[in-house]
Image (cartoon, rainbow, N blue to C red):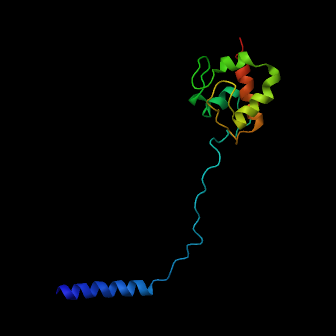
Amino acid sequence: MKKLVIMALAGAFIINCSDKKTEDTTSTTMLEEPTQQTEAPSANDLDGKSLIEGMDCATCHKENEKMIGPSYQEIANKYTEGDMDMLADKIINGGSGNWGDVPMTPHAGLPKENAKKMVAYIMSLKK
């Protein structure tokens, strides 16, 4: 009886393998790894504070106290309105050296217009 079961299974295996057509795997699409760390909010009518709240900024920054990076208050007090473009570029491209050794994460997908709104909000905190 054991031989009969083994032969039946072996026969089924051989038939199954020999009749099976190979599947075309060339149409299988793999998902690409994300190239950007952050997706930019798409709404153009968001204000700077809303944009900041919708991103990962709170990981390193707070409004009035230093964390990993400087507080928004410290940034506002250090820079002037003339630094708006430079600060917007810093948000988009990241950087290091201005506030210590920890680099700021780039936000490459963020439109410059939105980065400027974020900077304008931060600069409004100047005392």
From what the image shows, is residue 27 above or below residue 72? below
Query: Which residue sits furthest left?
Result: 1
Q: At 75% across and 24% down in the image, what residue appears?
A: 120
Number of numbered labels in the structure image: 0
Q: Quadrant of the C terminus?
A: top right
- The image position of residue 62, as x and y in percent, is 59, 22
From what the image shows, is residue 19 above or below residue 45? below
Asked if residue 45 can be seen in this view, the reply is: no
Query: Which residue sits furthest right?
Result: 82
- The image position of residue 113, as x and y in percent, is 77, 34
- The image position of residue 68, as x and y in percent, is 58, 26
Asked if residue 19 can be seen in this view, the reply is: yes
Query: Which residue sits furthest top?
Result: 127
Whether residue 24 sits left or right of residue 84 in the image: it is left
Q: Quadrant of the N terminus?
A: bottom left
In terms of depth relative to the viewer, which is nearer, 99 or 17? Answer: 99
Res 52 quadrant in image: top right
Res 124 quadrant in image: top right
In terms of depth relative to the viewer, which is nearer, 79 or 103? Answer: 103
Q: At 35% across and 83% down in the image, what residue appears?
A: 13
Res 126 quadrant in image: top right
- The image position of residue 109, as x and y in percent, is 70, 42
Q: At 32% across and 88% down in the image, what residue appears?
A: 11
Whether residue 102 sits left or right of residue 98 in the image: it is left
